[in-house]
Image (spheres, helix red, strand yellow):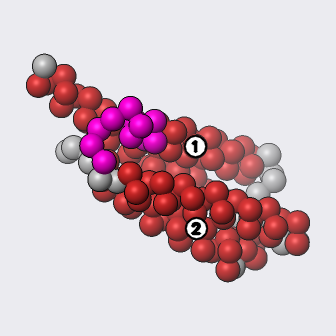
Amino acid sequence: MRIHFRWVATIFAVFLWVVALNWMLFPALLLDMWDLPNDPAEQTLGLRVAGLVLGWGVALFLARRQPPSPARRAISYGSASANAAAAAGGVYSVMAGLAGTGVLLPVVIEVVAAAAFILAERAHQDADLARA
């Protein structure tokens, strides 16, 4: 099965928008779900992260129909790296007792996202090699 960048970018752009909206509108819900302190400092940090996540989703959405290029490859590998780092941070947080097991659902999504972006780029590279 070939994974297409267009679908990966679209799905995760929408996912990131949902996450950003949750951080903007319901920060206490996410903090409670992850067993993190629900205080104004944490909520303020969540609002700042929401802006970054929203922008990342916009970049993915705008790039979703672009042909293969070095810029698209950078977006794919950057997204894969960011998701892998977030997943590692989530696992560490649970293991260190800093967060509850509610963090593990986002970790699974982040691992799937990282793999999907890498596979989408590899599928294109394999197709290029087959044509050569």
Residue 92 among those drawn in magenta:
no
Q: How many marks?
A: 2
Q: Quadrant of residue 43?
A: bottom right
Depicted 5 relative to depicted 130: above or below: below
Front-most of 12 and 28? 12
Does 66 sit left or right of 45 as displayed?
Answer: left
Q: Which residue is pictured at 20% across the width and 45% down the height? A: 1
Q: Can you identify the residue that label 1 sits on? A: 82
Image coordinates of residue 91 in percent, x first then y, are 66, 46
Alpha carbon separation for disc pair 2 and 1 = 15 Å
Label 2 neighbour load within 10 Å: few <14, some 14-19, many 20+: many
Above or below for 42 versus 62 = below
Horizontal side, residue 101 vs residue 106: left or right:
right
Residue at which label 2 appears: 19
Query: Could you say where residue 92 lies in the image, as x and y percent from the top left?
Result: 72, 43
Q: Is residue 123 visible?
A: yes
Tell me the magenta residue range: 66-76
At horizontal 41% and vertical 59% (from top left) the residue drawn is: 61
User: Which residue: 32% across, 41% down?
Assistant: 120
Q: Is residue 90 above or below residue 77?
A: below
